[in-house]
Every structure is written in C-alpha cells, then in structure tokens.
Image (spheres, coloured by chain):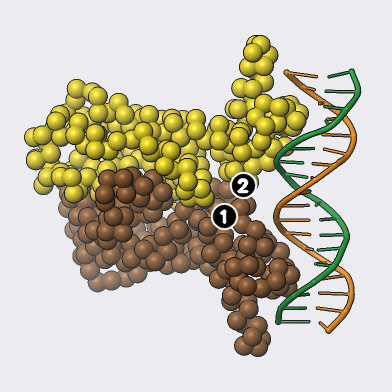
Chain colours: A brown, B yellow, C orange, D green
Amino acid sequence: MTENDKQTEEKIFESATDVFMAKGMDGARMQDIADHAGINKSLLHYYYRTKDHLFNAVFEKIAGQMFKKFAPVFDENLTLEEKIRFFYREHITFLQNNPRLPAFLLNELHRNPARIKKLIQGIDINKIWSTLEAQHKDDLIKYNITRETIPQLMTSIAAMSVFPFLAKPIIGSLMEKMGYDFDEYIEERKKYAADFVIKAMKK
Amino acid sequence: MTENDKQTEEKIFESATDVFMAKGMDGARMQDIADHAGINKSLLHYYYRTKDHLFNAVFEKIAGQMFKKFAPVFDENLTLEEKIRFFYREHITFLQNNPRLPAFLLNELHRNPARIKKLIQGIDINKIWSTLEAQHKDDLIKYNITRETIPQLMTSIAAMSVFPFLAKPIIGSLMEKMGYDFDEYIEERKKYAADFVIKAMKK
DNA sequence: GTCTATAGAAGGATAGAC
DNA sequence: GTCTATCCTTCTATAGAC
C-alpha cells in the first residue's frame, strides 16, 4: 500500500465516520461522503465495495472506543470512591471529545439488534464483579452492594455521564433558553456526578 | 368524515407510528406502512399527501405524550420526596408501555435539530422553578438546591428513568448474559431510582 | 374512497477510459 | 488509483379507472 493509498483510504474513512455519525446508516448518502472527502463517489466502492462494508468498518471502530474507557477503572490501585471519581473525569472527558458517539451507537443498535452480541462478547461482567469483590470487600459491605443490586447501580453510574449527551438536543436547548451554558454544565458534571453517586450509595 | 374514513385514517396513523418508531424517518418505507395497515400504498398519499406530512403527524403526537407526564408532578399537594417517588412510579410505568419512545424522539431530534424549538416552546422552566420554590422553600434549603444546581439535579432525575430505555439494547443483552430479567429490573427501578436520588440530594 | 399502473427521482453500484 | 458515464434498483408520488 502506497502512501497515497493510505491518504485516500483514511480520508474516506474519516469522512464516512462524520457523515454516518451525523445522519445514521439510513440517512447517510454515498455522495455526501464522497463530497466530504473531496473525491469521486466511485472511489468509495473501490476501497470499501459497498455502503454496508464502509458502515461496518466505521461502526466497529466507534464501538470499540466506547467500551475501552470502562476497563482501566478496574485495574487501578484505588479506593471505590476514587475509582468513581476517576471514571467520571475520564469518561466525560472522552464524551466531550466524542459527543455524538453514544447517540449514534445506541441508535444503530436499536435498528440492528444483531450487532449487539458481537459488541458485548468481550465484556465479562462476572469477571468485573469478581475483581470488584476481591478489591473492595469492605466497601461493598459499607455501601450495601450485592450481586442483586449491581445492575441498578451500574446503569445508574453510566446514566449520569451518558444521558446528558444522549439528550443534548433537549437539554442544550432548555439551558440556552434559561441562560445556562451546556459545555460548562458538562464540565461541572465530572464532579457533580461523582458526588451524587457516592452520596446515593451510602447506607 | 364518514365512519369508514376515520377507520382507515386511524389505521394508517397507527401503522405509521409503529413503523416510524421501529425504523426512524429515514429507514421507514411507505410500502411497509401500507402493508402494516393492510391497505394500498396510494391511500397513504390520499390521506397525508407526503411521507413528510405523515411523519410530522406521528412525531407531534409522540412528542406531546412524552412531556405531559412531567407536568402533574408540580400540581400535587405533596412533599418533595413524595413527588419524586410519584414521578418515578408514573414515568417508568409510562415508559414500560412506550419503551421505544425516548430513543425515537431523541434520534429524530439529533437528525433534525430544527424541531426542538417548537417542542420545548411550551415548557417554561423558570415557571416550574418558581412553583417549586414557592411550594418547597424548606426542602430546597434542606437539600441545598439552588438555581445553579437545578440543571444538574433535573437531568440526573430524568437520566435515572430514561437511560435504561435508551440503552436497552446493551443493558438488556448484558443482563440476559448474566441471568437477570430486564422487565424485573425496570419494575424494581421505580423504587430504586427514587431512593437513589433522595439519598443523593441529602447534604 | 380504494385500487392498478406507472411516472419520475434518487441513490447504490459498475464498466471502462485514462 | 481516479475519473466520467451509466446502469439498475428502490422508493416516493401521481394519474386514472372503478
């Protein structure tokens, strides 16, 4: 593969990412992607054969990024509270740089549930739970966390950081109407979400 | 308008709602809607002229339902805690009956931000805040709620009930993998979310 | 009011020149 | 590897008979 190949192929991939993120699989047009990349429509087919192939390439990459961010939390030598604060700082910073990612991902999963199995096959929640159990036995007792309440707690933690980006069209507009700034709100959320969850967990 | 007219028009509307909810504006096909309603494709145009008109009719109805559910909370003669418990019981029950509604709504708003202004024009957050301020002066002090923290708190409350439905493709699959039942998880959430938020709010 | 038939446009994909 | 021209399918929309 020559240097020029790589440039074009990458340019296509990046343009496709932008357009698919903005319009979704169904709404995106091959012509838009070509225009966005400043190249001819035929070249898309030359490199990726079909729209489906191109979309899949984009989706896999995007989906991978989303979940990598959850992993490191469980490797650190930190208290449970520190992990929660660490998670929100890292995860919300990631979402600040990829604000459309959650909406794109979830929407495509709603439309095509078959993708899910492949997406979550790498996630072993039981292993995550065992790790937490080993590292934070005292905290789990202190906070009254059991295998029964794990789904409720985990989804609540995720909701606090992801929801503002999913509901940004509404939240952002309402805030504008009231004179608040969405970006400031997000920045503050790194601390707010952590405080909120930690207080909620206490017995 | 004859009785038969109404039957056909309503049948079209209901089929359109189902198909648009499942596939979105871009993914939906007029043929699908016609098949789903058991009628001819031309009839869709006879009653609604274009796909756009039909979609708009569906969207307006759906969007209206979503926000009506928030209003009554502020009229009741209840304590702040009771209102929160009341809200989660009502709102999650509504979402149990309309699980795809939030994803549909937010996705279309992401794709077409112009809709938002019309959607939120009826919502006067300042008025809501004034009502709360008048009704729960003591509670606001007790819970340390101010105009500055209202966006963080309001979005956290909404996140707790809406997020599970937005992320259902992932949450549901992960739970299945671990032997949990999504519907049970949702039923339990009516209480869990209320307890969680009320604890989090305490100083 | 409902159907059949078809026009007309859009979009994905390919052939072939360079 | 990149472009122009074009095919072919799909989909929205309309015309016209009943």
Identify which amino acid the numbered label 1 is placed on. Answer: Gly
Determine the image quadrant of residue C16. Answer: bottom right
Residue contact at pointers 2 and 1, CB within 8 angstroms: yes
Confirm whether residue B53 shows in the render: yes
Residue A101 coordinates in the image, percent (x, y)? 46, 59
Q: Which residue is mark 1?
A: A24
Query: Which of the pair B188/B36 is nearer the observer?
Result: B36
Q: Residues within 10 Å of mark 1 (few under 14, many from 20)?
A: many
Residue B44 coordinates in the image, percent (x, y)? 69, 30
Determine the image quadrant of residue B133. Answer: top left
Q: Which residue sits at x=50%, y=30%?
A: B61
Residue B16 coordinates in the image, percent (x, y)? 61, 33
Which of the numbered marks, if any, corresponds to residue A183?
none
Label 2 to label 1, Cα distance in Å? Answer: 9 Å
Residue A150 coordinates in the image, percent (x, y)? 33, 50
Q: Which residue sits at x=31%, y=45%?
A: A177
Determine the image quadrant of residue A118. Answer: bottom right
Identify which amino acid the numbered label 2 is placed on. Answer: Asp
